[in-house]
Image: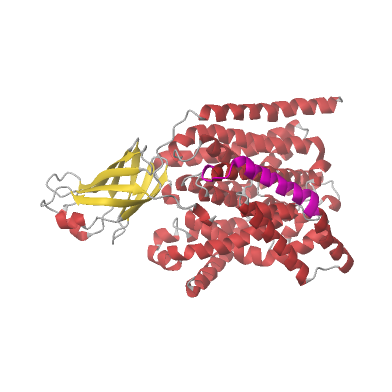
Amino acid sequence: MPNLFILTLQLAVVLAVCRAVGWLFQKIGQPKVVGEMFAGIMLGPSLLGWIAPHASAYLFPASSLGFLNALSQVGVVVFMFLVGLGINPRELKKEGHAAVLTSHVSITAPFVLAAFLALFLYPRLSDDSVHFTSFALFMGAAMSITAFPVLARILAERDMLGSRLGTVAIACAAVDDVTGWCILAYIVVLIRSEHSSISIWWTIAGILVFGLAMIHGVRRLLTGFEKVYRKKGAISENLMALMLLLVLASSLFTEYLGIHLLFGAFLMGAIMPKEAAFVRYVLDRFETITVTLLLPLFFAFTGLRTNIAAVKGPEMWMYCGLIILVATLGKLGGSTLASWLSGMPLREAAGLGTLMNTRGLMELVILNIGLDIGVISPALFSMMVMMALFTTFMTTPALSLICPKDLLHSAKEESSDSIPASVSLQNGQGAAA
Amino acid sequence: MSHTNRNFVIAYTLLVGLPLAGLAGVLKSGHSLRAPVAIEGTWKIDSTSLHTAGQSCEKAVSALAASSFLISQSGKTLTFTLQNAAQTSGDGSLDGTSVNVPLAVTDSAVQGCAAGQAVVLTGTIQPDSDPRSISGLIWVAECPACATIQFHAVRQPKAQRGGH
């Protein structure tokens, strides 16, 4: 049984610290979510556990972490559903060849560079229970992800959603996330099959059947939600509960199949109807509690697993610097080069590269999965968390430097029709992640 | 094929196709890499004995005996925690199959007895045994007259992490 006093105290402290640090970060021009990510790290062994070990042990006893994790995972399940809901693959088609090339290069460049880096890091930061292929693929997936919701938030705050840069960035980030999660699903299956009696081929066949059934069968049924919304302008509580049940069922199914429950939640969101008003309505219903309470718990839980002290000595800090450098070079450099070659002016191309380098909460979700399945070690986890924080933190100042607002406004050319449904993330609490 | 499409195909091949071919090469060459022996997890000590009974510090060193210990591993870097009353821990290293961990002993009896010398855990992993095992000593550095603990431990099956 959970100690309710401790659990409630944890909720209160996490909520207060995340709101306070998020507010402070907003004051320095950063998205609130970056502050919340930092707040999570502050509550862990890297700061609170270091300066006040007794307070830390009282507030976050080891026996309580299971409950905190469970609550935070519920939040991440709903969040992944919302991320999937906000993604509209049609946006990429509208942007043509330039977006296709930029999107694919923004995945392959960091992926391949990360695989090269894995050649160096594997003998130093991994162990022989992890195959090199799994390690390299995981590093690639983790470095090629883009935080779609943070990106939408930054674009909204800078009034860039309607610009060419904004729409290409949103389209590319959507493709990056879908691709990144597909690769990650494969890695999870690969690693779990090593410890399972069921053949990997059965698992892959099961996932394919499930995916096809969802895309070609369940998706059609889901249009019923949109029809009801269009007819009545609202969705009843019973129907919202049914939607949530479907998310949970899909999550359970992917967990049962041997991948992670987050994939099911993401897939359910991705196949939901994409009519902008409907998507906004659903986001509004789910976002408040998820973003205000449950996601900060996830940040806190991630912070409790992140120990900057695990990065010991100049050698390890050099590895950390190398990770940040490769991640930035691959994502920012690759996206900039591809979009510039596709005909985008250099300054805008660099702006796009900067936006694509935003990793945010999506990176933390992936890293937690990696640590759970044992593909990355605790020290590498801490280094990658620092990389996620660094690349997310640098986005806003770098963008201000590369693409001043007046330059972007002159380049604004798209109508409001092209603004993706995820723009609801701009309404305050939707700072989502 | 139009001019634009041809340029797209060329750019796509150069920027996406070639790196993917490089990835295949990296994955192939990585197979020959050797990572450190995996020793992360809980180890159950199945035998402990005072290797040099009757010598000084016997009582204090005996207090370090534990029923199990935890290892957190990041490559060759280890964090070691003995599951004794004081939860004695230390950061150590793995070199091949040899483990070396200077323990941060907070017990004043041991500190006084060892006259400021470090208490060290050393061991050798048997990587081919299933489950993996380790044999080693807990001893006071630069004190040949001090008692030492000899131990043998077996790694416990790993519970699937993350509650999945």
Q: Does the segment drawn in magenta span residue A47?
A: no
Q: Position of residue A288 (x, y in %)?
A: 68, 66
Quadrant of residue A289 within the rendered picture: bottom right
Rendered view: B2 above or below A406: above
User: In terms of depth relative to the viewer, which is nearer, A282 or A169?
Assistant: A282
- Where's residue A134, x and y in %? 55, 39
Of A5 and A392, the residue lying toward us: A5
Q: Residue at x 50, y 44 (%)?
A: A376
Task: Give left or right: position of B103 versus B61.
Answer: right
Give the residue displayed 10% in from the left and 52% down from the top.
B54
Q: Position of residue A193 (x, y in %)?
A: 56, 43
**So how many labels did they put on this image?**
0
Residue B133: image location, x then y, percent: 33, 44
Q: Is residue A321 visible?
A: yes
Q: How is the image coloured?
A: secondary structure
Q: Is residue B82 left or right of residue B112?
A: right
Predominant SS of the magenta segment: helix
Q: Which residues are magenta?
A: A194-219
Residue at x 57% of width, y 59% of height: A298
Establish if A338 lies above or below A53.
Answer: above
Q: Is residue A130 above or below residue A271?
A: above
Nearest to the observer: residue A151 or residue A79 = A79
Instruction: Report the residue at 44% width, 57% height from top.
Output: A45
In this image, A187 relative to A128: left or right? right
The C terminus of chain A is located in which quarter? bottom right
Q: Quadrant of residue A317?
A: top left
Residue A216 on the magenta segment: yes
Any part of residue A420 in sight: no
Q: Residue furthest bottom?
A: A5
